[in-house]
Amino acid sequence: MTSRIEDFAGRAAILAIFSALMVLETGTIGGIFNARESLEGWSLILISRIAALIFMAMSLFFTLVRLPAKASAPGLAPRIVSIAGTFVMSLLIVLPVGTVPTEVRLFGTAMIVVGTILSAYCLLWLGRSFSVMATARKLVIAGPYSIVRHPLYVAEAITMSGVMIANWSISSVAVGACWFMLQFRRAVNEERVLRAAFPEYQEYERRVPMLLPFRVVKAAR
């Protein structure tokens, strides 16, 4: 499959999947609003769903207008990891989840809101370089990318931690653990591609930590 055909197929798939998810999310938002009188903490839950809808719309938009890929990870494994990492948390829709106290559920929901807002902020900086697959388009090193090399994954980790807490169960912990492992693998795959495509990436690696801003914290002290 040529890179152009693969890029077209990827855009078409994201368009179809994210459009369907946005329709479902819109229905969920309507259901939450209609059940607001009997749903404790409904306003926070509603905000979390609206934030998720906005993030999905942004992801879809930047996928459609993204820059041409300069390089991509070879082989099937990186593609499987990227797809699985993007959608594995959807398994919680069909798997049994636990019932937690209202306070715990709302705390998890608050984490989801914070994580999703931060994800949208990072996505704005990533812009047309955004891609589900491990590809190199344009090197982004400003904004949140000057703090850690993968701020979008860090923000999404906050969101997914909130999902796990709000749906605490063996299933949610197992799926969440899989998500964290897949995302780390995605980050490694992406760095290999970026390192090969952009000679300046090695200097960026030396200067900016991967996921946790330890160097920033140390410098601040």
Image: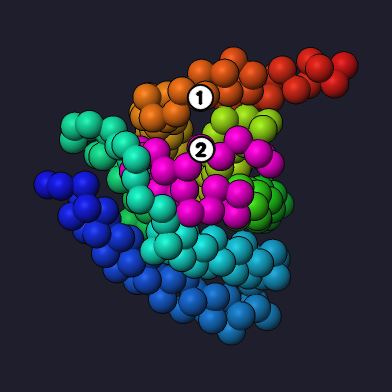
Quick check: marks 2 and 1 in contact, CB under 8 Å? Answer: yes
Residue 162 higher or lower than 53, as above or below: above
Of all residues, the one furthest to the front in this rendering is: 199
- On the image, the x and y values in percent for residue 90 come to 37, 53
Q: Residues within 10 Å of mark 2 (few under 14, many from 20)?
A: some
Q: For this view, does 134 lie left or right of residue 52?
A: left
Q: Position of residue 156 (x, y in %)?
A: 55, 44
Q: Position of residue 44 (x, y in %)?
A: 69, 64
Q: Is residue 168 visible?
A: no
Residue lying at the far right of the rendered structure: 221
Q: Secondary structure at mark 2?
A: loop
Closest to the observer: 110 or 126? 126
**Vertical placement of residue 134 versus 129, above or below:** above
Q: Which residue is mark 2?
A: 139
Residue type at mark 1 is Tyr
Q: Quadrant of residue 181?
A: top left
Q: For residue 201, which numbered disc appears in the image?
A: 1
State the residue in front, 196 or 64: 196
| Residue located farthest toward the bottom when viewing the structure as drawn | 34
**98 drawn magenta:** no
Residue shown at the point (65%, 39%) measured from the top left: 142
Q: Earlier in the sequence, mark 2 or mark 1?
A: 2
Give the magenta part as a residue range: 123-144
Question: Which mark, residue 108?
Answer: none
Residue drawn where x is 26% and y is 39% of the image: 79
Identify the residue shown where x is 46% and y is 78%: 27
Quadrant in which the C terminus is drawn:
top right
